Amino acid sequence: DVKVTQSSRYLVKRTGEKVFLECVQDMDHENMFWYRQDPGLGLRLIYFSYDVKMKEKGDIPEGYSVSREKKERFSLILESASTNQTSMYLCASSKTQSTDTQYFGPGTRLTVL
Amino acid sequence: QKEVEQDPGPLSVPEGAIVSLNCTYSNSAFQYFMWYRQYSRKGPELLMYTYSSGNKEDGRFTAQVDKSSKYISLFIRDSQPSDSATYLCAMSPGEKLTFGTGTRLTIIP
């Protein structure tokens, strides 16, 4: 069974703080993704990675960065959190192609005050 | 205009009814079409996967793709309360996925 875990279910941070969201998958998947999910906007891709140390911008990368030092771990970094980054953040992984089944973690609800 | 349009609902139907969920899209390069189901406070999980046009059936679920009309559908037969969830369509030309906004479905016992 594929398992994707995220470091926190709920997180509250203050404006300007540096925020780290971590994601770990246990199925040796090559691709990993970070999305944010907002009412009325659906899932939007922030960044994805198809290999260790590789990253590609998604549709809304502004204000975010990522790190993938190990195959199983993909981190999303908010350098200076802002209130408009309050959202549900979902991590996903897929075996080789982006169009392979994506397996999602449970999500992190981030609130920036 | 969004690349993928999906009616957000909410949609409420009685148990046992046939449910029809739909998405339209504008990008003719989309070749891969998926339906994900998301229960409350959980991540989405893949429900149906279709490549190009045609129908695919899996138990009570049928996915249809009409590329000429740029329209995809998910049908749920004999709907159950456990089908209550948000259903997201997703599609891709071969790279990253583009998701619809999701339709919230409630099956009333």
Image (cartoon, grey):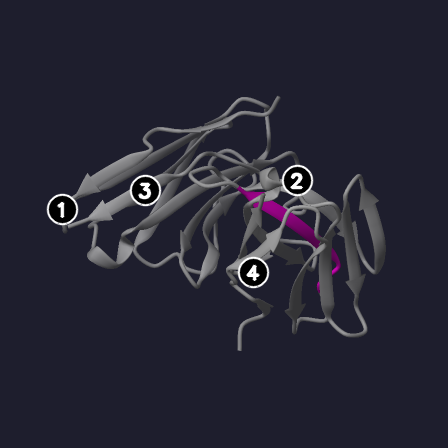
Hey, what amino acid is under mark 2? Thr
Helix, strand or loop under label 3: strand
Q: Give me the C-alpha separation between circle 4 and circle 3.
A: 20 Å
Q: Which residues are magenta?
A: B30-38
Q: Give me the C-alpha separation between circle 1 and circle 4.
A: 31 Å
Locate residue A12, reporting x and y percent. 20, 40
Locate residue A22, reporting x and y percent. 36, 32
Whether residue B97 appears in this view of the structure is no
Identify residue for label 4. Answer: B100
Hey, what amino acid is under mark 4? Gly
In the image, which disc is placed on residue A101?
Answer: 2
Identify residue for label 1. Answer: A14
Helix, strand or loop under label 2: loop
Asked if both marks, 4 and 2, belong to the same chain, the answer given is: no
Which residue is at a point 32% across and 31% down the rendered structure image? A8
Q: Give me the C-alpha separation between circle 2 and circle 1.
A: 35 Å
Chain to which the residue tagged by mark 2 belongs: A
Instruction: Characterize the local packing of mark 4: few (<14), some (14-19) or many (20 or more) Cα atoms within 10 angstroms.
Output: many
Identify residue for label 3. Answer: A109
Helix, strand or loop under label 4: loop
Tag in front: 1 or 4? 4
